[in-house]
């Protein structure tokens, strides 16, 4: 799959996610072979006035790897300035967010609100296309439509392409759905059918595993799949998809040692690339992600959440995995069986899911 002149192989993208797709997590996903990562959405206004918190999130991928920057806004000049900034740090593409359902974004008539104003949305795409060099594709990510009665994604996508968009990503929910209900593959298929065939259409929504990827490709005819929540604490999904896309067998889920190794890598990146007072919070998040679904994970998460100290948090996680690995070999279980669902502690994913939902409600 190509976006303009940019190859994306395998045809799998990491979804932009506020407070999730920071540089450490993007790096881990890139190391596992995702086709392309995109920053979380960044306010064009904040970038254009040099707000340090927002410019701090404008980060280039490591080792010269390609990456995209996602921006949102409504002012042509600010969108143009933000796009130029993105290109100045080496972005391979600039994606425009026209799907965010959050109240504060929609109140500013940005994000998914633009799906109700295709002409304004077109002026923004044109402004960004004119601001960046010809080799930098401008792309748009949007939803199925505003609500059930206004599912205008196919017409909207065509209007964006007419204005110069070189790739369309569709999350198959409406704005009013937020993250409830299901992403609808049918609307993604309608977009694929409507948009000229040389423009890639990326299907997005509810893909959690290899089967979900295959289903999305088959049901919609999309050229690539974008994965968000399914990659949180599960970056090896990209390695599995890379193998499957190359026609090789699915290597399957990771064992405990692999989980621990990737957790360590992720935390190491958080410490070196982010640092600062938020480090403990980020490490707690990583702990919840990588222990999710494992025996005793909820008790671990509570202990890590309670400790005010980074070193203690890290050793709690190390001890947890060491004991789990020991338990697994003592009980003679196959690699994944020691990593069974946490039946004692209840829903193992609760905290992460709740945290995601609250961030998503705010920012996605
Ligand atoms: C925590 C969180 C933050 C998100 N932030 C963004 C964002 O910054 N930009 C964006 O276009 N979509 C954002 N989204 C939406 C995702 O990119 C994606 O469209 C959505 O989660 C559906 O895909 P999934 O089912 O694979 O997660 C966010 C979603 C979540 C859960």
Image: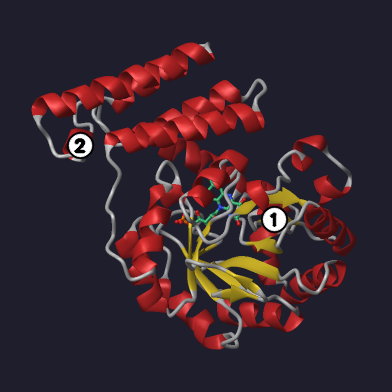
Whole-angstrom CA distance, mark 2 to mark 1, is 37 Å
* Disc 1 secondary structure class: strand
Identify which residue is drawn at 74% across, 59% down.
Answer: 109
User: Is 258 drawn above or below residue 235 in the view shown?
Assistant: above
The one of 318 and 79 positioned closer to us in this rendering: 318
Q: In this view, does 323 lie above or below 259?
A: above
Is residue 284 shown left or right of residue 291? right
* The image quarter in which residue 359 lies: top right
Q: Position of residue 273 (x, y in %)?
A: 65, 33
Q: Mark 1 points at which residue?
A: 69
Residue 165 image position (x, y, % from top left): 70, 75
Task: Give SS at disc 2.
Answer: loop
Q: Give 72 or 134, whichever is nearer the viewer.
A: 134
| Crowding near the residue tagged with mark 1, few <14, some 14–19, many ≥20 C-alpha atoms within 10 Å | many
Quadrant location of residue 96?
bottom right
Task: Name the residue nearer the viewer: 92 or 181.
Answer: 92
Residue linked to disc 2: 340
- Ligand 1 within 8 Å of disc 2? The answer is no
Q: Which residue is drawn at 48% across and 53% down?
A: 228
Q: Which residue is drawn at 87% across and 49% down?
A: 48
Can the viewer see residue 182? no
């Amino acid at each position: 799959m190509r976006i303009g002149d940019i190859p994306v192989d395998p045809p799998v993208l990491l979804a932009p996610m506020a407070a999730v797709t920071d540089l450490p997590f993007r790096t881990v996903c890139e190391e596992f072979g995702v086709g392309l990562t995109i920053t979380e959405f960044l306010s064009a206004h904040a970038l254009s006035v040099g707000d340090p918190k927002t410019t701090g999130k404008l980060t280039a991928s490591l080792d010269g790897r390609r990456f995209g920057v996602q921006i949102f806004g409504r002012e042509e000049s600010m969108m143009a300035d933000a796009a130029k900034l993105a290109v100045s740090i080496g972005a391979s593409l600039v994606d425009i967010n026209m799907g965010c359902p959050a109240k504060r974004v929609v109140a500013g008539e940005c994000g998914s609100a633009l799906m109700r104003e295709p002409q304004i949305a077109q002026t923004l795409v044109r402004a960004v296309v004119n601001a960046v060099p010809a080799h930098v594709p401008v792309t748009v990510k949007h939803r199925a439509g505003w609500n059930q009665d206004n599912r205008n994604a196919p017409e909207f996508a065509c209007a964006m392409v007419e204005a110069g968009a070189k790739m369309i990503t569709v999350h198959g929910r409406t704005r009013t759905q937020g993250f409830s209900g299901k992403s609808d593959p049918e609307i993604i298929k309608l977009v694929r059918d409507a948009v000229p065939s040389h423009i890639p259409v990326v299907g997005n929504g509810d893909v959690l595993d290899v089967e979900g990827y295959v289903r999305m490709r088959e049901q919609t005819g999309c050229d690539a799949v974008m994965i968000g929540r399914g990659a949180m604490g599960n970056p090896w999904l990209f390695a599995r998809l890379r193998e499957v896309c190359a026609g090789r067998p699915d290597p399957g889920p990771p064992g405990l040692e692999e989980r621990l190794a990737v957790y360590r890598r992720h935390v190491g990146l958080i410490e070196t690339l982010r640092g600062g007072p938020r480090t403990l919070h980020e490490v707690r998040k990583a702990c919840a992600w990588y222990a999710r679904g494992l025996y005793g994970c909820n008790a671990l998460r509570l202990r890590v959440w309670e400790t005010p100290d980074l070193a203690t948090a890290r050793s709690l996680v190390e001890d947890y995995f060491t004991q789990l690995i020991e338990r697994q070999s003592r009980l003679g279980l196959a690699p994944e069986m020691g990593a069974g669902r946490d039946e004692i502690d209840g829903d193992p994913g609760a905290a992460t899911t709740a945290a995601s939902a609250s961030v998503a409600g705010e920012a996605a």
